[in-house]
Image: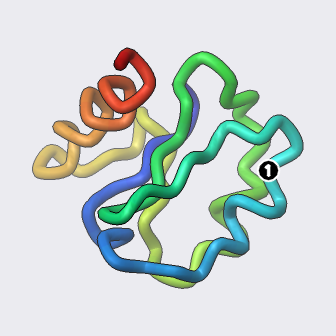
Amino acid sequence: MAYVVTDSCRGCRFTECVTVCPVECFHVDEMMTYIDPENCIDCGACVAVCTSTSIFPVDELPEELKEFVAKNAAYYSN
């Protein structure tokens, strides 16, 4: 997974990140938005338009947000 959505996305309904994704790797549910780790192509288009500063490259995640790597992946494993 190249990018991950974190907790500051909870309740956010600005979906510019979803619309700019060239491979449609996002899904929005009633809680937040998730990035499919298998489909993300590391383009970064979503980061540039994120209004809530919720999307990070996995290798730049602060320690306290690392749990969101598994949360994004788990969403797609069900």
Residue bearing the label numbered 1: 21
Amino acid type, residue under disc 1 in the picture: Cys
In screen coordinates, is 22 left or right of 73?
right
For image coordinates 72% across by 73% down, the residue present is 16
Query: Residue most toward the right?
Result: 22
For image coordinates 60% across by 73% down, the residue present is 50
Quarter of the image where the C terminus is located:
top left
Q: How is the image coloured?
A: rainbow
Q: Is residue 18 above or below residue 9?
A: above
Residue 32: quadrant of the picture: bottom left
For image coordinates 20% across by 49% down, the residue present is 65
**x then y, percent, for residue 62:** 24, 51
| Most foreground residue, 43 or 12 | 12
| Most foreground residue, 13 or 47 | 13
**x then y, percent, for residue 76:** 44, 25
Query: Residue most toward the left?
Result: 64
- Count of all numbered marks drawn on residues in the image: 1
Residue 17: quadrant of the picture: bottom right
Few, some or many residues within 10 Å of mark 1 (<14, 14–19, 20+): some
In screen coordinates, is 59 left or right of 51?
left
In screen coordinates, is 27 left or right of 41?
left
> Tag 1's secondary structure?
loop
**x then y, percent, for residue 61:** 33, 46
In screen coordinates, is 16 left or right of 58?
right
Residue 74: quadrant of the picture: top left
Q: Is residue 73 above or below residue 29?
A: above
For image coordinates 26% across by 63% down, the residue present is 7
| Most foreground residue, 5 or 61 | 5
Q: Is residue 77 above or below residue 43?
A: above
| Most foreground residue, 57 or 14 | 14
